[in-house]
């Protein structure tokens, strides 16, 4: 599957906004090759109105032609009489097709989706529910399994689909982010694969079978310890600022003599803790690796995560214990 830009849905604030833009492997587009597919089955209300209007117009046109045709002896007269009716019919037909395209029938979309991802049944998953998150724009499909974590698909109509694994706390973790967290090499190798998601699920199922005890823990780490660069205001000077825990925790870093050290850490509900301990740093080699990763548009979590946790661990005595109670994954033993 190709890499495309999609908006990730924040499930807790779905009615307020669509949050950060990310690069994510698409599972395929929901656009159909022909309009015909969209009006099969029972049409929805907008489709019904247009179809009835089109049928009424066509019947009215036929009736008027039958009534007035005998009086039109000249071919040019017949053409002038019929042409406006035909133009109106074509316009109304185009409007009907447009409505069928922009207001698709969720039942037909669901059938199309289930058929496209029928291979999930081989792994014991089945579609339990589907509904609009945003009318006529975003549909959520929930697949469940007797033993393994549920999967949620968020489909942006005519744009693509984003898959999520559901944690025990009903939090959603992007499957592709999780694969990148588990095995960065496999993630990179699947980017241009036409059957990327199928191969991705093979890896996930195998992991859930062999490491079922660790799976929930790994999901939690991936969900909350996926670091991202954040631009803090000038009142909070730092060379780098990394966010985690869904924007609830921010960690600032500075550099002295080429060595990276922990400047401060702030957490929702606990405030900001100034560390500014330039005597405790990463090694020169680790600092160089850290800075090189920060220059990338998308840095490696596998490289950055242990470096961040190491600095936090080295400065643990200077950080309030409440931070680790509220954000336990920040401890080095994760």
Image: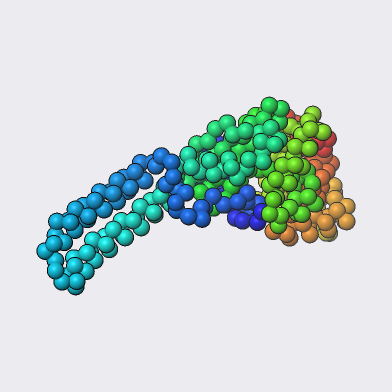
| Residue depicted at 76% across the width and 34% down the height | 208
Q: Position of residue 297 (x, y in %)?
A: 69, 58
Query: Looking at the image, which residue sits at the far left?
Result: 71
Q: State the residue in front, 212 or 98.
A: 98
Image quadrant assignment for residue 123: top right
Quadrant location, the N terminus: bottom right
Tell me, yes or no, if residue 247 can be seen here: no
Total tally of numbered discs in the picture: 0
| Residue depicted at 79% across the width and 46% down the height | 183
Tell me, yes or no, if residue 96 can be seen here: yes
Q: State the residue in front, 20 or 47.
A: 47
Q: Position of residue 8 (x, y in %)?
A: 58, 46
Q: Is residue 206 left or right of residue 32?
A: right
Picture colour scheme? rainbow
Q: Is residue 287 left or right of residue 249?
A: right
Quadrant location, the C terminus: top right
Q: State the residue in front, 280 or 149.
A: 149
| Residue depicted at 79% across the width and 32% down the height | 209
Query: Looking at the image, which residue sits at the far top?
Result: 146
């Amino acid at each position: 599957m190709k890499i495309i830009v999609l908006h990730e849905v924040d499930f807790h604030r779905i009615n307020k906004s669509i949050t950060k833009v990310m690069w994510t492997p698409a599972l395929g587009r929901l656009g159909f090759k022909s309009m015909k597919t969209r009006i099969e089955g029972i049409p929805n209300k907008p489709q019904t109105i247009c179809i009835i209007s089109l049928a009424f117009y066509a019947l009215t046109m036929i009736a008027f032609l039958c009534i007035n045709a005998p009086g039109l002896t000249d071919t040019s007269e017949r053409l002038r009489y019929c042409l406006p009716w035909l133009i109106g019919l074509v316009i109304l037909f185009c409007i009907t097709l447009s409505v069928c395209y922009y207001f698709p029938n969720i039942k037909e979309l669901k059938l199309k989706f289930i058929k496209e991802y029928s291979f999930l049944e081989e792994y014991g998953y089945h579609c339990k529910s589907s509904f609009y998150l945003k009318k006529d724009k975003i549909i959520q499909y929930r697949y469940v399994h007797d033993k393994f974590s549920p999967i949620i698909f968020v489909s942006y109509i005519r744009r693509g689909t984003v898959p999520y694994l559901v944690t025990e706390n009903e939090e959603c973790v992007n499957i592709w982010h999780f694969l990148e967290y588990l095995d960065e090499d496999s993630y990179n190798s699947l980017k241009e694969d036409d059957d990327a998601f199928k191969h991705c699920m093979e890896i996930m199922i195998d992991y859930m079978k062999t490491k079922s005890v660790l799976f929930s823990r790994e999901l939690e780490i991936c969900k909350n310890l996926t670091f991202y660069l954040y631009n803090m205001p000038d009142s909070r000077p730092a060379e780098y600022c990394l966010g985690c825990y869904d924007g609830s925790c921010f960690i600032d870093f500075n550099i002295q003599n080429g060595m990276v050290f922990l400047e401060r850490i702030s957490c929702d509900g606990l405030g900001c803790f100034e560390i500014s301990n330039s005597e405790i740093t990463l090694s020169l080699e680790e600092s160089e690796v850290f800075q090189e990763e920060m220059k990338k548009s998308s840095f490696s979590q596998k490289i950055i995560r242990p470096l961040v946790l190491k600095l936090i661990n080295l400065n643990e005595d200077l950080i309030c214990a409440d931070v680790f109670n509220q954000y336990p994954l920040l401890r080095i033993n994760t």
